[in-house]
Image: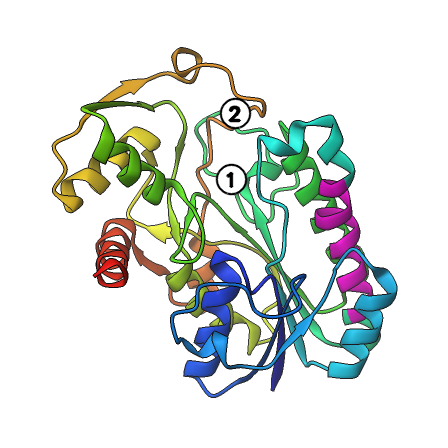
Amino acid sequence: MKVFVTGVGGQLGRDVMNELAKRGIEGIGSDIAPEFSGLQDGSAVTTMPYVQLDITDEAMVEKVLSEQQPDAIIHCAAWTAVDAAEDEENRAKVKAINEDGTRFIAQAAKKLNAKMMYISTDYVFNGQGTEPWQPDCKDYAPLNVYGESKLAGEKAVSSLAEKFFIVRIAWVFGQNGNNFIKTMLRVGKSHDEVRVVSDQIGTPTYTLDLARLLVDMIVTEKYGYYNATNEGGFISWYDFTCEIYKQAGYTTKVTPVTTAEYGFSKAARPFNSRLDKSKLSEAGFTPLPDWKDAVRRYLEVLSASEG
């Protein structure tokens, strides 16, 4: 089996490539840079086949994928800067990457009769209420430009690709690039107190754990919509920060605040990011480990890389 992975310079794409290598599955990485530009840590992704791909170039997408002839495509590439997506000068870029680029990948997947996996987000929903969002729920109402673009990507995949997985994730952290944990650790070192939002509820997703699940899925034909975050229940960003500092041995005071008290951000954030993941077990897939265990393992990786 040959799996083509987009966005390998990012947090998730990197871990997906390493997971493929770990299992002896042929993987081809791609990103917009001429050469792999992710974390140079000696892991398999740095030595596996890599091709440059601008997913916003329809002709290039068709050419590269027709040359590579993959059996499956895991589409991790995306614009993920949520606040920056609101800026007028960025909106065309966001659409080009998250909507048009995804459509071009889906078109190529259909032409090749390849499986396609699209990584989506809780932001496709309106973030209201307290009930967990079901994977097959179509009650869409994105609150911001980023969410609208990811929903457009979902619709492109479901309408074009014949063999597709759409996997929604939330609160992502991984080794490659920046994320909430790295930010909180950095802030916690330089401040005696931090204010963290306590009225937005969800569950974190560790890319290392997610990559294992995605590869578990891509080798099957159990297509459809799925939600995938770590286990361990639903928490707030405040709860998340408290656990990060506890495990890291920080004494920084964490003060809970509401979204309104925290202050204005360009993009509206969902209050309810609870995702129901029961469909994973029902389909025979192993759920991701508890998020607290994921934080522990992640902090160990960060410590080792700094040491």
What residue is pinned by disc 2? Answer: 128
Q: Which span of residues is magenta-colored? A: 93-108
Please give left or right for residue 169 compared with residue 125 in the image. Answer: left
- Measured as percent of width and height from the top left, residue 136 is found at 60, 48
Q: Amino acid at mark 1?
A: Trp
Dot placed on the residue nearer the N-terminal end, 2 or 1: 2
Q: Residue 299's spot in the image, x, y percent?
A: 24, 54
Density class for disc 1 (Cα within 10 Å; few <14, some 14-19, many ≥20) is many
The quadrant in which residue 65 appears is: bottom right
Q: How is the image coloured?
A: rainbow
Quadrant containing the N terminus is: bottom right
* 99 is within the stretch colored magenta: yes
Q: Is residue 49 left or right of residue 189?
A: right
Residue 304 part of the magenta segment: no
Q: Residue at x 47, y 88 (%)?
A: 24
Majority secondary structure of magenta residues: helix
On screen, 148 above or below 23? above
What distance separates the C-alpha of mark 2 from that of mark 1? 10 Å
